[in-house]
Amino acid sequence: MIRKLLTITVLTMIHLAVTNAQVLAFYDGHDDDEEEEEAEIDSLQIEESGFVSFVDFDHQLIPCADLYHFSWDSLNVDLPRLDAKDSSDGICLSLVESDCGYFHPCPGDINSDYGWRKYRMHKGVDIDLETGDSVFAAFDGVVRIAKYNYGGFGNYVLIRHYNGLETLYGHLSVRLVQPNQTVRAGEVIGLGGSTGRSTGPHLHFETRYKGLPIDPNRIIAFDSQSLKLDTLSLTVQDFKAVTPPPSSTTRSSVSYYKVKSGDTLWSISRRYGTTVDRICRLNGISRNSTLRIGQRLRIR
Ligand SMILES: [Zn+2]
């Protein structure tokens, strides 16, 4: 009996979430991000996390509601998808206002950059961290998605900001925020980890506009952990950047790994699906070289 009641409760919550997502998302579409997967797995997450229904959410709190066509979807990262007509004249986003600053999500080096990998687009940057390190919201905003994605991001959080951008934080060990929750820049939204499709602890961090990824390096200076610009101008060219350039689908982006205790060239090569010889060639070292903890090795 109790089990039956629980099932009904969970099903009701799923129904509420899905119904409201459909009502709020004026733009139809599907998520073709390779790191995303089907909604039936999302329903498990609703059961696991005690998901907060949209019913009590004041829709006036949605950041940049008109810019995003009043879409507020708690399941799909890429909704709403940018309409080509919207981008014809370009757009200018004021990233920081007097009462809304920037806070660096986590202080590590970039292990893998934004760009095309062998078969797919890497839509963000991978920032080195240790499991349990704090991960901070980059700007003020409202959490749109906070859930587990088994195939890709693992535990992840996506925030819509008042400046028009969205940011995504993947592979967290712990989520500390709920959908529809207001957050301030610098607020801890989760703890770093290696959940989902991940080969070691890092933060997968994306900057997005209307369902399309923007190279975070355009906006953020990762070495000084600061914003590069106060105003971001996006043009048609930026929106085309997600299309693979001709013959580039076989070109992988440069990728680095920071050596940790216990690593060997063999274990690193296995982890990244490459060979010891290739790592040696890329780094000008020999198979017998001694690795130092903290040493940066180019993997691709
Ligand atoms: Zn990544």
Image (cartoon, rainbow, N blue to C red):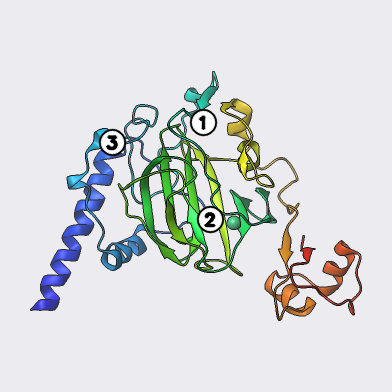
Q: Earlier in the sequence, mark 1 or mark 3?
A: 3
* Closest to the observer, 99 or 290: 99
Which residue type carries mark 1? Leu
- In the rendered image, which quarter is residue 269 located in? bottom right
C-alpha gap between disc 3 and disc 2: 30 Å
Q: Which mark is residue 95?
A: 1
Which residue type carries mark 2? Glu
Q: Which mark is residue 34?
A: 2
- Where on the image, by quarter, is ligand 1? bottom right
Q: Tell me if I can see residue 215 in this picture.
A: no
- Local crowd size for mark 1, using a 10 Å CA cut-off: few (<14), some (14–19), many (≥20): many
- In the rendered image, which quarter is residue 264 located in? bottom right
**Disc 2 beta carbon < 8 A from ligand 1?**
no
Q: Earlier in the sequence, mark 3 or mark 2?
A: 2
- Please identify the quadrant where the N terminus is shown: bottom left
Q: Is residue 217 above or below residue 172?
A: above
- In the rendered image, which quarter is residue 259 located in? bottom right
Residue 7 position, x and y percent, is: 17, 70
Q: Is residue 188 above or below residue 210?
A: below
Residue under label 3: 61
Which residue type carries mark 3? Leu
Q: Is residue 58 above or below residue 143?
A: above
User: Is 188 left or right of 46, judged from the image as shown?
Assistant: right
Q: Tell me if I can see residue 165 in this picture.
A: yes
- Please identify the quadrant where the C terminus is shown: bottom right
C-alpha gap between disc 1 and disc 3: 19 Å
> In the image, what residue occupies the spot 32% across and 51% down?
179
Foreground: disc 3 or disc 2: 3
